[in-house]
Image (spheres, coloured by chain):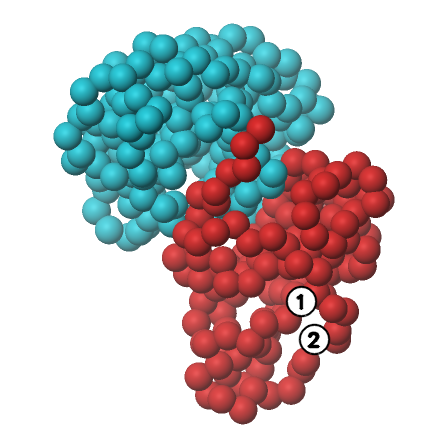
Chain colours: A cyan, B red
Amino acid sequence: MTAAAVGLPSTPAQADHSWNNYHWGRTGAVQVQVFSSVTSDWSDELSVANSDWNKSAVLDNTIVAGATDRNTRRRCPTVSGAVRVCNYTYGRNGWAGLASISLSGGHISRGTAKMNDTYLAQDSAAMRQLVMCQEVGHDWGLDHQDENFNNPNLGTCMDYTNNPSTNQHPNQHDYDQLAAIYNHSDAAATTGKASNKSAIRTGNTVTIITWVQ
Amino acid sequence: MLALAAGCGGSAAQPSAETGSTPPSSTHADPQRGTINVTQRGAAAPKTMWFVRIESPDSKPLAEAGFPDRPVSFSRDLPTGQYRVIAWQRPCGGPCQAAGEKGLGPLDDVCGAVVSVTSGRPVNAVVQISTDGGCTIATRP
């Protein structure tokens, strides 16, 4: 997906949690297929998360059915120009969620979001919604707003917390940041803050890790 | 495809192969510093390369190494405090190389754990590789 971003007046900066300014190249709103490779017990969370993110003026993504066999969910293979969301018992590896993006031509070209059922299958509905919302949010180029588990909730799924009750959905800050990320011409792209979490670069793919607290 | 600048704080460090060494086990002389020893349990699948990284509490990479042709064996002397040890593996299209991206596939499995570095005794972090290629990091004082 290499369409150039349309140049629009930039939104005044009030948030600064873009994930290193990674973003999808597009003309108009981002319109990406989100392949659902999750089992039925995660369908609602994905549907809610996608609807939430689509409230942004710059996102208009569609969930499509993906393969849900164990092998696909385990590997969570990327799809060019799309995002795939998977759940699986990935093991006691210390992470609850994982988001990966690949880049081409300076833009996100594909992404994945993984939900680790080893930890999340028995977790609260609120935490599951938070993690789903957060990992998918990373695939659109958002970083966390806060990484302190013990301070008051910011009311966004991009905020680490031990009490997810009020952090299950994006907040206006997220939508403002998305507008700032995407309402620019490529030549005038601003630089987002350096990510302050575990991120592993492998070739042209970057993986951001949501660790279990 | 363009090379990507690292999203994490600082530039993306190319993994460098550590020379094989037995992790030290002696008591550290400096009371403000301690040692993390990272080793491996379980066999890596053929044509895979494991990497290890130690991060600061705010997720800044402090040390990183790749192990193309031998088990993970990695040791670092650090100020006392908490750190995260991360391990991940990538498939190799051909012979696993000590440096560079040639032949390396995408990140396949990753695991991490927080470890506490104290003076007096090294902390041992064992990367336990399972038969399906996944991993867990177990720590022992």
Residue A42, position in %: x, y? 49, 21
The residue located at (59%, 12%) in the rendering is: A66
Which residue position is annotated with label 2? B23
Position of A109 with respect to A77 (left or right) is: left
Q: Amino acid at mark 1?
A: Phe
Q: Quadrant of the C terminus of chain B?
A: bottom right
| SS of the residue under disc 1 | strand
Q: Measured along the vertical axis of the image, is residue B89 above or below residue A65?
A: below
The residue located at (29%, 34%) in the rendering is: A190
The residue located at (50%, 15%) in the rendering is: A1
| SS of the residue under disc 2 | loop
Label located before the other in sequence (2 or 1)? 2
Residue A202, position in %: x, y? 60, 41
Which residue position is annotated with label 1? B74
In this rendering, the count of numbered labels is: 2
Question: Callout 1: 10 Å neighbours few (<14), some, many (20+)?
Answer: many
Query: Residue B5, which numbered label?
Result: none
Kindly check if marks 2 and 1 are in contact, taking CB atoms under 8 A apart as contact: yes
Q: Amino acid at mark 2?
A: Pro
Please tell me if label 2 and label 1 are on a single chain.
yes
Farthest residue in the front direction? A187
Depth order, front residue of B52/A76? B52
Q: Measured along the vertical axis of the image, is residue A199 above or below residue A142?
A: below
Q: Picture quarter containing residue B28?
A: bottom right
